[in-house]
């Protein structure tokens, strides 16, 4: 055997050894197929495969993120909205992720889009805006249920943005202003009721009519705010006199 042949054999052996030895990181798993049949899952660390005979698919077990593009959806109360979301998921079964679905990330993305449209379409606009955590939970559970046969675990789903038509923005602003005005009127009315109750108690203590006392209070407030001359009827002078006594 000449030197040339020996060198060629050594090169072939080195090539075979380099192809037979693989080092996988802690978060990686190798799904091994031997002559087309599933042979098992190996890793992490140092693994050995048979060149040419064995084929491997390396799967990462780290969490991956899928950005769900804006989906045009009609809510339950017939309001058109655009909703986008983000999905956090990871592979928990490398064998299923390779054997049960062709592209688990693409499949998860498509399931996330259809589920987002279905869930938001069953909710009213107020729910989508005010109960986002609840909707996120429903999305996570439904998407995770669909991806479980693929060996994919969906850990969280977050709605990022809800875009509504401009006329809805104006309508919501008017509704918010009306609600603030309603609350202000209620507070004012409650204050008037309390003031009337105190005024009644004061009138009972002074032994005068509550309406007359209210009239005198109003006169006092007007006189304090404006420099005016006020003409008081004689009957109210008698009330003053009775109060003074």
Image (tube, rainbow, N blue to C red):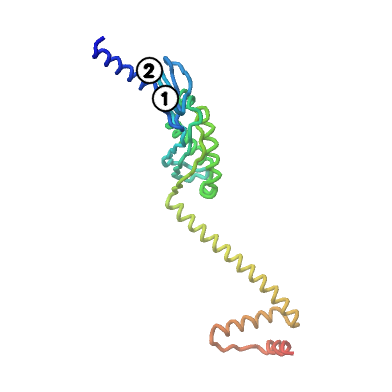
Q: CA distance from mark 1 to mark 2?
A: 14 Å
Q: Is residue 224 above or below residue 23?
A: below
Residue 118 lies left or right of residue 210; in this view the side is left
The kind of secondary structure element at disc 1 is: strand
Residue located at (61% from left, 66% from top): 187
Which image quadrant is residue 142 in? Answer: top right
Which of the labelled discs sits on residue 131, or is there none? none
Residue denoted by label 2:
51
Q: Quadrant of the N terminus?
A: top left
Residue 55 versus residue 139: which sits nearer the camera?
A: 55
Query: Is residue 103 something that shows in the picture?
Result: no
Residue 43 lies, in percent from the top left, at 46, 26
Which image quadrant is residue 123 in? Answer: top right
Residue located at (46% from left, 52% from top): 168
Q: Is residue 151 above or below residue 83?
A: above
Q: Quadrant of the C terminus?
A: bottom right
Residue located at (27% from left, 14% from top): 6
Residue 84 lies, in percent from the top left, at 44, 43
- Which numbered disc, 1 or 2, marks the residue that appears first in the sequence? 2
Residue 39 lies, in percent from the top left, at 47, 18
Residue 214 lies, in percent from the top left, at 66, 79
- Closer to the eye: label 1 or 2: 2
Numbered-mark total? 2
The kind of secondary structure element at disc 2 is: loop
Q: Is label 1 in contact with label 2 (beta carbons under 8 Å)?
A: no
Residue 141 lies left or right of residue 201; in this view the side is left
Q: Is residue 63 above or below residue 124?
A: above
Category of crowding for the residue at label 1, using alpha-carbon neighbours closer than 10 angstroms: few (below 14), some (14–19), many (at least 20): few
Category of crowding for the residue at label 2, using alpha-carbon neighbours closer than 10 angstroms: few (below 14), some (14–19), many (at least 20): some
Residue denoted by label 1:
57
């Amino acid at each position: 055997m000449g030197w040339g042949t020996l060198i060629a054999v050594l090169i072939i052996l080195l090539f075979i050894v380099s192809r037979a030895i693989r080092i996988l990181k802690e978060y990686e798993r190798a799904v091994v197929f031997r002559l087309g049949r599933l042979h098992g899952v190996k890793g992490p660390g140092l693994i050995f495969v048979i060149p040419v005979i064995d084929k491997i698919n390396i799967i990462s077990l780290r969490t991956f993120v899928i950005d769900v593009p804006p989906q045009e959806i009609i809510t339950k109360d017939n309001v058109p909205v655009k909703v986008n979301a983000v999905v956090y998921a990871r592979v928990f079964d490398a064998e299923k992720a390779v054997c049960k679905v062709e592209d688990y990330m693409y499949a998860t993305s498509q399931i996330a889009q259809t589920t987002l449209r279905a869930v938001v379409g069953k909710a009213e606009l107020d729910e989508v805006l005010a109960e986002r955590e609840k909707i996120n939970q429903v999305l996570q559970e439904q998407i995770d249920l669909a991806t479980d046969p693929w060996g994919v675990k969906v850990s969280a789903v977050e709605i990022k943005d809800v875009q509504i038509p401009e006329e809805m923005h104006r309508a919501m602003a008017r509704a918010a202003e009306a609600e603030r005005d309603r609350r202000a009127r209620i507070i004012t009315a409650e204050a008037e009721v309390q003031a009337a109750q105190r005024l009644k108690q004061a009138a009972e203590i002074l032994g005068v009519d509550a309406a007359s006392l209210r009239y005198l209070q109003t006169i006092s407030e007007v006189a304090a705010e404006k420099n005016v001359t006020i003409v008081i009827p004689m009957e109210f002078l008698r009330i003053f006199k009775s109060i003074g006594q």
